[in-house]
């Protein structure tokens, strides 16, 4: 990509001109030469100037996407690539999605990856399937997984219904990601459909999904809603599910579960799980006795 660099004086002069236009509520010129100059300005070392260029490109919107995507993909300047991703976040248009996906997967800079994920989160529903696809790829790093979960969580807080199909996916990793994306909605106690989806996941055929669902239930629901379903999981055939369930009963302060935990302790053969059950029982007993 060939973008002529601006001198410090040229960048300052252009930024001042753009700021004045923005202050007057005017949209900057969107011809190719003007767009290229603004993208070049994204590489300036002065943060206040970069912000002015980003706001200007953001106010232009869709017309600026091709130039920004080209910069994100091909610029040798890490500052321009970072700022291009951040500016695409300001615009939030799905036309940038293919390039954001490519940058997220191939750019080695963590800031570019993070800003690309943020832009995809802003785009919303159209980004869900691409993000889930990346999540299941073997080369996806732990850092990228964290960014994807944050992006999906943001989208889930705005559009929970968009995860209906993901939570029924044949891939347990995708079902877990969908559950995590819906955590905030489950906690809000306002979306009954989401809460039903999370509760249904307690009966998922995969233990990893049941374990994750048990944890989310403990964070988001009270004993009247979920205690009975969690009690059944204390006899689950997976140790992690039993641990997470005990911890969730403790977190939701389910004092009605004390006797059930006592029985589970007597039946438990795994000492590590038994220790967790004992801690949960003791904490709940202490809470009951001080009510």
Image (cartoon, helix red, strand yellow):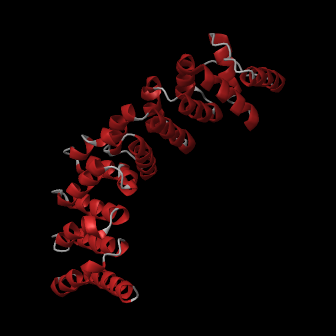
Q: Position of residue 89 (x, y in %)?
A: 54, 33
**Above or below, comparing residue 148 to residue 91 in the picture:** below
- Count of numbered tags: 0
Left or right? Give the position of 187 relative to 211: right
Quadrant in which the N terminus appears? top right
Kindly indicate the quadrant of the structure image that contains residue 22: top right
Residue displayed at 41% across by 45% down: 157
Residue displayed at 84% across by 24% down: 9
Kindly indicate the quadrant of the structure image that contains residue 264: bottom left
Q: Position of residue 262 (x, y in %)?
A: 22, 86
Residue 238 in sight here: no
Residue displayed at 27% across by 70% down: 245
In terms of depth relative to the viewer, which is nearer, 201 or 240? 201
Quadrant in which the C terminus appears? bottom left
Left or right? Give the position of 290 relative to 265: right
Residue 193 in sight here: yes
Kindly indicate the quadrant of the structure image that contains residue 277: bottom left
In terms of depth relative to the viewer, which is nearer, 18 or 137? 18
């Amino acid at each position: 990509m060939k973008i002529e660099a601006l001198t410090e004086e040229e960048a300052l002069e252009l930024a001042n001109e753009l700021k004045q236009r923005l202050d007057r509520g005017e949209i900057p010129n969107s011809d190719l030469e003007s767009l290229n100059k603004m993208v070049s300005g994204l590489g300036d070392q002065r943060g206040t100037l970069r912000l002015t260029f980003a706001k200007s490109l953001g106010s232009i919107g869709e017309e600026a996407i091709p130039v920004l995507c080209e910069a994100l993909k091909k610029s040798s300047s890490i500052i321009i690539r970072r700022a291009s991703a951040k500016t695409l976040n300001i615009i939030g248009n799905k036309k940038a999605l293919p390039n954001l996906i490519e940058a997220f997967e191939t750019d080695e800079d963590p800031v570019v990856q993070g800003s690309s994920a943020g832009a995809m989160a802003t785009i919303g529903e159209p980004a869900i399937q691409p993000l889930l696809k990346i999540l299941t790829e073997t080369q996806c790093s732990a850092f990228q997984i964290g960014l994807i979960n944050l992006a999906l969580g943001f989208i889930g807080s705005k559009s929970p219904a968009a995860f209906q199909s993901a939570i029924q996916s044949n891939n347990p990793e995708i079902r877990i990601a969908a559950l995590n994306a819906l955590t905030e909605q489950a906690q809000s106690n306002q979306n009954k459909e989401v809460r039903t989806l999370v509760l249904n996941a307690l009966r998922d055929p995969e233990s990893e999904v049941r374990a994750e669902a048990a944890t989310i239930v403990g964070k988001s629901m009270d004993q009247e809603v979920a205690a009975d379903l969690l009690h059944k999981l204390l006899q689950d055939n997976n140790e992690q599910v039993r641990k997470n369930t005990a911890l969730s009963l403790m977190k939701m302060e389910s004092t009605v579960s004390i006797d059930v935990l006592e029985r589970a302790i007597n039946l438990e053969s795994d000492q590590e799980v038994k220790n967790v059950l004992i801690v949960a029982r003791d904490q709940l007993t202490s809470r009951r006795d001080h009510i």
